[in-house]
Amino acid sequence: MRIVLLGTAAGGGFPQWNCWCPICRAARVEPHRAQARTQSSAAVSADGERWFLLNASPDVRQQLACLPGPLPTSVRHGPVEGLALTDAELDHTLGVVLLREGRVLHLYATEPVRAILEQDSRILPVTRAFADTRVTRLPVGDRTQLRYRDDTASGLSLEPFLVAADPPRFATGAETGHTTGFLVRDDATGGSCAFVPGCGALTKPLLESWESVDLLLFDGTFWSDDELINLGISDRSARAMDHLPVSGSDGSLRQLAGLAVPHKVYTHINNTNPMLLEDSSEREAVEQAGVTVGVDGMSFLV
């Protein structure tokens, strides 16, 4: 199974269009210190040609250029066979509407995510006006086979698991399953990837469940709990926004460092996070702990 990081920034991308915090300023003035990033998304494939997206960001059009595969011979061709959504947040789902030209879209989502897309953000009704939009409902804790557009098996399976988070602020309901992570498996090789772009807390059972995966893509949104407060951007902490900070005695870095996982990668990184600067002490601390700061286009074979 091949996994490509299409985008590794949190909502707004990096540098964010309206932000001149020290990290965004450095990215603009000294671009050699920090690579630009688009909004968080990944893609998985069993054959390196047909792909399933894990979330669909507003930057999906340019992100699809990262996907390898043969040049098409037909007038219309798209490498996306389906989209699996961990939640209904706008930065993870606006790309669904932007893919409407595909004419046939196959979405995988839990029932609470489907309901929010149908009733609250209205992304499903809007997309359905342009494309045949099908939704396969994902039961939490159960494995579902991903299928190509012609309904043949892809050889990949996906299992959603619950993570600590609140539903989107525009959602009218808060049913269990509104926010998940994904465990993606290659049924032929046994290769596996845990995709967790948003997570407010880590538990022992959750950490133990990742001990056997080959690749962990984890929430690296904020470096510190008071990051936005100290910058005067917000009065909410990282944890109040359902993102476990990277640093601290109970932060994600210390907990992930002990996992015997071959590849541990931070994704969904906010534009204010100092580990985006390649010459920062924060970046050095992450790398010394055996974790990688993800960047767009990074590819793994598991």
Image (cartoon, rainbow, N blue to C red):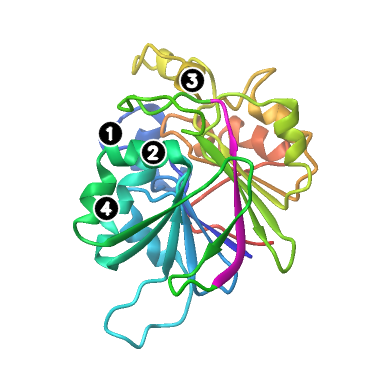
Q: Which residue is drawn at the image coordinates 48% and 42% (left, top)? A: 110
- Is residue 193 at least partly visible in the picture? yes
> Along the polypeptide, which appears first: circle 4 or circle 1?
4
Which range is magenta?
153-164
The percent position of residue 194, horizontal first and vertical second, equals 63, 46
The amino acid type found where label 3 is placed reads: Ala
Residue at image point 54% right, 34% down: 220
* Left or right of 204 in this view: 161: left
Indicate which disc, 4 or 3, sits on the residue closer to the N terminus: 4
Say which of marks 2 and 3 sits in front: 2
* Mark seen at residue 97: 4
Q: Amino acid at mark 1?
A: Asp
Residue at point 50%, 27% (across, down): 222
Q: Is the Cβ of the residue at disc 1 closer than 8 Å to that at disc 2?
A: yes
Q: Residue at x 64, y 65 (%)?
A: 1
Categorize mark 2 by other alpha carbons within 10 Å: few (<14), some (14-19), many (20+).
many
Q: Earlier in the sequence, mark 1 or mark 2?
A: 2
Which residue lies under the disc numbered 2? 88
| Secondary structure of the residue carrying numbered label 2 | loop
